[in-house]
Image (cartoon, helix red, strand yellow):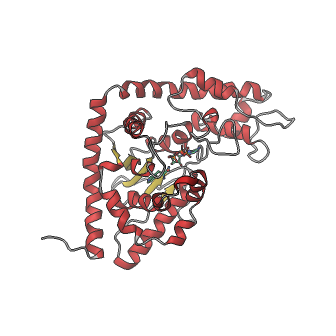
Amino acid sequence: MENEITTPNTNTESAPKKRMLSGIQPSGDLHLGNYLGAIKNWADRVNDYECYYFMADLHTITVRQDPATLRKRSLNQLAQYIACGLDPEKNVLFLQSHVPAHAQLAWVLNCYTMFGELSRMTQFKDKSAKHKDNINAGLFTYPVLMAADILLYQADYVPVGEDQKQHVEITRDIAQRFNSIYGDVFKVPEAFIPKAGARVYGLTTPGDKMSKSIPEGCVFIMDSPDEIARKFKRAVTDSDTEHCVRFDRENKPGVANLMNIYSAITGESFEEIEREFDGMGYGAFKPKVGEAVIEHLRPIREEAERLMADKAYLNEVYKNGAERASYIANKTLRKVYKKVGFYQLP
Ligand code: ATP
Ligand code: LTN
């Protein structure tokens, strides 16, 4: 499929840089799935792209949030983004609610999105099953706001984990529909899914993606080394008799998940990992993966802690980010308003 790419074309020196954009909801602490599936992948590409990354706070209220916690997380997540390698000098980092154009464009796009296509979104089906007492309209139109996030910036690539691919596809459909009526208003974006780390599974539930809703099997970026070691020690491995470290997603999902994590962290291929751990059982492999994760996350956690204490700096980053993001976003919004026929003052 056209948008199912793993390696976007790198820019030639003379061509203008292509644009990348992505966001994560500040609805929980960042975990290894967020990091390997999304953020690490963003930080690795900063020199080749013009990058926009934001905290999707508007999206979080589709599920009830405690206001004080949301406020705190919105700031802490920025500190964690930076600590994970997103340099605010090289990336535009901002909070979604600081750029009103997101909500403004979302309304317009709501009128170009069909009820039927929103009904097919798996995230809506999952989340409405989980929050039966609060199946609000925002949860249903969530993908439209996400389309607005992306299309406002004329993004070429949207680096996300595999679970978000369907949302990027609907964004393409909305953009193409709008463009077919009004001409080339929006760039049609492509999802950019990493090869390793695209789907990190829970350590205790290797059949389900790692998620903050199952904290025992979820390694948080801010977890202490002891906690991480404990979680890896308790990782579920497989009940096969072979007991050797071999990549077999179907029959050995627990080991495959650990290998995937190890590969994403060390850059080693599955064959190299198999060779490295040849003759070792699961018992020896689990703590090794844990150690690699601990050492990789240690400087990130320490830097995040330092930044979280520097509120003035974080505020400044947010202020600057909102200004730079608004400049691009408002340009697109003005064009859309004009195209659909909203009267503009001279
Ligand atoms: P939840 O716990 O509610 O399912 P989440 O922790 O998955 O949420 P999101 O805000 O949905 O967090 O995801 C943020 C980004 O991280 C997205 O790009 C998503 O694809 C990626 N991501 C999240 N979990 C994983 C995972 N287990 N493996 C790979 N990527 C992931
Ligand atoms: N839906 C995404 C978060 C998100 C996003 C975006 C990602 C909101 N807007 C725009 C990429 C581009 C999620 O839940 N992970």
Q: Is residue 60 above or below residue 237?
A: below
In the image, farthest residue toward the left: 346
In the image, farthest residue toward the bottom: 181
Report which quarter residue 112 is drawn in.
Answer: bottom left
Report which quarter residue 332 is drawn in.
Answer: bottom left
- Please name whichever residue, 246 or 340, is drawn nearer the observer in this view of the structure: 340
**In this rendering, does residue 15 appear at all?**
no
Q: Is residue 84 above or below residue 7?
A: above
Viewed as shown, does residue 172 lie left or right of 319? right
In the image, farthest residue toward the right: 241
Which residue corresponds to the image point at 73% horizontal and 33% vertical from the top-left?
Answer: 275
Which residue corresponds to the image point at 59% horizontal and 41% vertical from the top-left?
Answer: 213
Q: Is residue 275 above or below residue 226?
A: below
**In this rendering, does residue 302 appear at all?**
yes
User: On the rendered image, what quadrant is the N terminus found in?
Assistant: bottom right
Which residue corresponds to the image point at 55% horizontal and 37% vertical from the top-left?
Answer: 32
Q: Can you give x and y, in whole percent of width and height, for residue 170 in the image?
A: 50, 65
Q: Can you give x and y, in whole percent of width and height, for residue 120 in the image?
A: 58, 66
Q: Can you give x and y, in whole percent of width and height, for residue 138 in the image?
A: 45, 58
The tally of labels here is 0
Which residue corresponds to the image point at 26% horizontal and 36% vertical from the top-left?
Answer: 316
In the image, farthest residue toward the front: 133
Q: Can you give x and y, in whole percent of width and height, for residue 46 in the image?
A: 40, 44
Report which quarter residue 305 is drawn in.
Answer: top left
Viewed as shown, does residue 318 lie left or right of 40? left
Viewed as shown, does residue 16 lie left or right of 268? left
- Please name whichever residue, 217 or 175, is drawn nearer the observer in this view of the structure: 217
User: On the rendered image, what quadrant is the C terminus found in?
Assistant: bottom left
- Please name whichever residue, 238 or 134, is drawn nearer the observer in this view of the structure: 134
